[in-house]
Image (tube, rainbow, N blue to C red):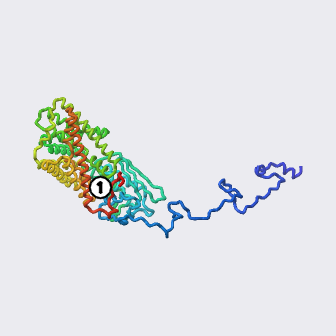
């Protein structure tokens, strides 16, 4: 076998057996070399197809490009308001609440440039952490009973102080949300937080207000880490008053309320014992996880049972005053004022939720008292609806009782010790105005209550502005003597005695008194803003709430 034949018989390599290798004897033609690389994309135009080319012009259609038909030389005249272009000037010598309320009511395009921001990292503010801090602060304020407008103002102040000026906070009854958009071409960053638990602690509320005040103050440097540390301390702080002291305050509040409606020393003690028993039962129900509706129902029973028992035992006391005093310790005046205030300032969803909560509390109180009164009447308790109306003219005792009631109410609200004396005096002034108008001037109780509550709101707003703090610690406890406890009791007693029409009239009167208190407090606050220095000129003034009639 020759050598070429042996070579042909050797096993060929993989390359030799490839389908892409030309067979032996076939000369491969070299591929034509193109001047430019051709694409095989399905979007490429085939050869030979002529497409008319459009002369290059400026891109049109973008929101950031000048329209092709616009000419700067022949531009139309700019619109100018009849009163001229107002100058927005937000002064720094007013509370941050006013400045933030002012900017919240402005459109984003009309808001002034950001103020001096707090020191942050070199690469700019940490947006997620700022939003998280803002939501945590808003949660404490909303859980403490603050109005929706003030919560939004505080959230806006925190974001703006850390350089996030294009932010929009939102507050409902159980949900807090905030959105920040860095620019018009960037996606917004949104965060939210749910408020699941509420607790009355005005000491914690004042501490949160102080933190927001320090953050929004350009003279005080508060970093993000420092703000988080202070917020953690506020959350860890215990209540200033113990549980047993709160129970004693509940008894003192009920006893003082019974004196306001004509009770004596025996009535004071009986009302205090009934209210303390109800408070302990409510604590027991809360420990078992029962909702607040059942807590109010159970808490209303001992005071009503005490009054009915004294009547059955033929003790010469005014049982109506005992039951009325016990009701004073349960009426949700704080939630009522906050709900009406949210409605008057335009936060209707939050206002509806708060008022619905108040209605549930009232229904719980009604059920608890009606059950006891029904069995009391069946057992022979002779409850006279006019007994508590025969209160003697003793203004000195009544003013002292109103101040004691306010003091005990302030303790129940866990207020700072520095504010207890001021709000106690405010409550005495409120009852003095009510007594002078109703008992001496013979003015209707609704009008007298509204005027006294307006004075409470005015004084509370002035004191809060003086101390750059929340107005709730100076107003909520002071309206305690004005709560419609007697009207509520008379309505329930009439229903228990099968006089439904008279009972509904009394309950309607109680609702009117409650609304008069809430509207009076809010009106007093608004009047204080009218006569005090406002930040800025006409454009910087606080705009009205959401209009629904087109003006």
Q: Residue furthest bottom?
A: 73
Instruction: Tell me the quarter of the picture where residue 310 sits.
Output: top left
User: Which is nearer the eye, 272 or 542?
Assistant: 542
In this image, 81 relative to 273: left or right?
Answer: right
From the viewer's perspective, is residue 493 above or below residue 206? above
User: Which is nearer the eye, 207 or 217?
Assistant: 217
> Where does the image place residue 171, in percent across and percent down from the top left?
36, 51
Instruction: Tell me the quarter of the picture where residue 544 sits.
Output: bottom left
Q: Residue furthest right?
A: 1
> Where does the image place residue 205, in percent across and percent down from the top left?
29, 53
Q: Residue at x 73, y 61 (%)?
A: 34
Image label count: 1
- Residue 335: tell me if it is visible: yes
Residue that numbered label 1 is attached to = 207
In this image, 189 relative to 310: left or right?
Answer: right
From the viewer's perspective, is residue 20 above or below residue 308? below
Work out which quarter of the rendered image holds the C terminus and state it.
bottom left
User: Under tag 1, what secondary structure?
Assistant: helix
| Other residues around mark 1 within 10 Å, as few (<14) / some (14–19) / many (≥20) | some
> Where does the image place residue 283, in percent across and percent down from the top left?
26, 41
User: Which is nearer the eye, 261 or 117?
Assistant: 261
From the viewer's perspective, is residue 506 above or below residue 236? above
In this image, 338 relative to 451: left or right?
Answer: right
- Residue 224: tell me if it is visible: no
Q: Residue at x 27, y 56 (%)?
A: 526
> Where does the image place residue 299, in percent across and percent down from the top left?
24, 39
Q: Residue at x 37, y 55 (%)?
A: 134
């Amino acid at each position: 076998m020759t050598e070429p034949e042996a070579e042909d018989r050797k096993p060929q390599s993989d390359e030799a057996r490839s389908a892409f290798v030309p067979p032996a004897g076939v000369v491969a033609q070299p591929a034509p070399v193109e001047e430019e690389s051709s694409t095989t994309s399905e979007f490429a135009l085939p050869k030979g197809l002529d497409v008319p080319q459009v002369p290059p012009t400026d891109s049109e259609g973008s929101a950031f490009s000048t329209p092709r038909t616009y000419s700067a030389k022949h531009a139309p005249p700019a619109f100018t308001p009849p009163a001229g272009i107002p100058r927005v000037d937000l002064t720094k010598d007013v509370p941050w609440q006013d400045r933030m309320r002012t900017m919240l009511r402005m459109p984003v395009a009309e808001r002034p440039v950001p103020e001096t921001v707090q020191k942050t990292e070199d690469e700019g503010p940490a947006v997620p952490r700022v939003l998280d801090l803002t939501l945590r602060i808003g949660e404490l304020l909303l859980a403490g009973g603050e109005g929706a407008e003030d919560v939004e103002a505080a959230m806006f102040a925190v974001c703006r102080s850390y350089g996030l000026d294009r932010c929009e906070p939102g507050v409902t009854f159980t949900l807090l949300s905030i959105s920040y958009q860095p620019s018009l071409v960037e996606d917004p960053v949104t965060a939210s937080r749910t408020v699941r638990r509420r607790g009355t602690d005005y000491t914690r509320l004042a501490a949160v207000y102080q933190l927001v005040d320090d953050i929004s103050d350009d003279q005080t440097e508060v970093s993000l880490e420092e703000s988080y540390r202070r917020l953690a301390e506020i959350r860890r702080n215990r209540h200033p008053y113990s549980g047993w002291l709160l129970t004693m305050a509940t008894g003192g509040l009920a006893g003082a309320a019974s004196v306001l409606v004509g009770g004596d020393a025996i009535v004071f003690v009986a009302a205090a014992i009934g209210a303390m028993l109800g408070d302990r039962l409510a604590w027991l129900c809360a420990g078992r996880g029962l909702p607040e509706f059942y807590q109010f129902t159970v808490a209303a029973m001992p005071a009503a049972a005490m009054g009915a028992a004294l009547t059955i035992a033929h003790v010469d006391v005014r049982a109506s005053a005992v039951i009325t005093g016990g009701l004073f310790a349960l009426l949700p005046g704080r939630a009522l004022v906050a709900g009406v205030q949210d409605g008057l300032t335009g936060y209707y969803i939050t206002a509806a939720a708060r008022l619905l909560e108040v209605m549930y509390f009232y229904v719980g109180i009604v059920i608890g008292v009606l059950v006891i009164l029904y069995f009391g009447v069946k057992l022979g308790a002779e409850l006279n609806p006019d007994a508590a109306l025969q209160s003697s003219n003793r203004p000195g005792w009544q003013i002292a009782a109103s101040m004691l009631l306010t003091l005990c109410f302030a303790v129940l609200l866990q207020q700072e010790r520095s504010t207890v004396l001021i709000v106690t005096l405010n409550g005495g002034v409120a009852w003095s105005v009510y007594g002078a108008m109703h008992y001496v001037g013979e003015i209707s109780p609704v009008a007298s209550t509204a005027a006294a509550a307006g004075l409470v709101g005015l004084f509370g707003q002035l004191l809060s502005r003086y101390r750059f703090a929340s107005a709730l610690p100076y107003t909520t406890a002071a309206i305690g003597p004005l709560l419609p406890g007697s009207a509520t009791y008379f309505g329930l007693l009439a229903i228990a005695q099968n006089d439904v029409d008279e009972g509904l009239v009394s309950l309607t009167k109680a609702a009117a008194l409650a609304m008069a208190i809430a509207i009076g407090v809010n009106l007093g606050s608004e009047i204080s803003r009218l006569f005090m220095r406002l930040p800025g000129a006409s454009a910087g003034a606080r705009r009205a709430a959401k209009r629904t009639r087109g003006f």
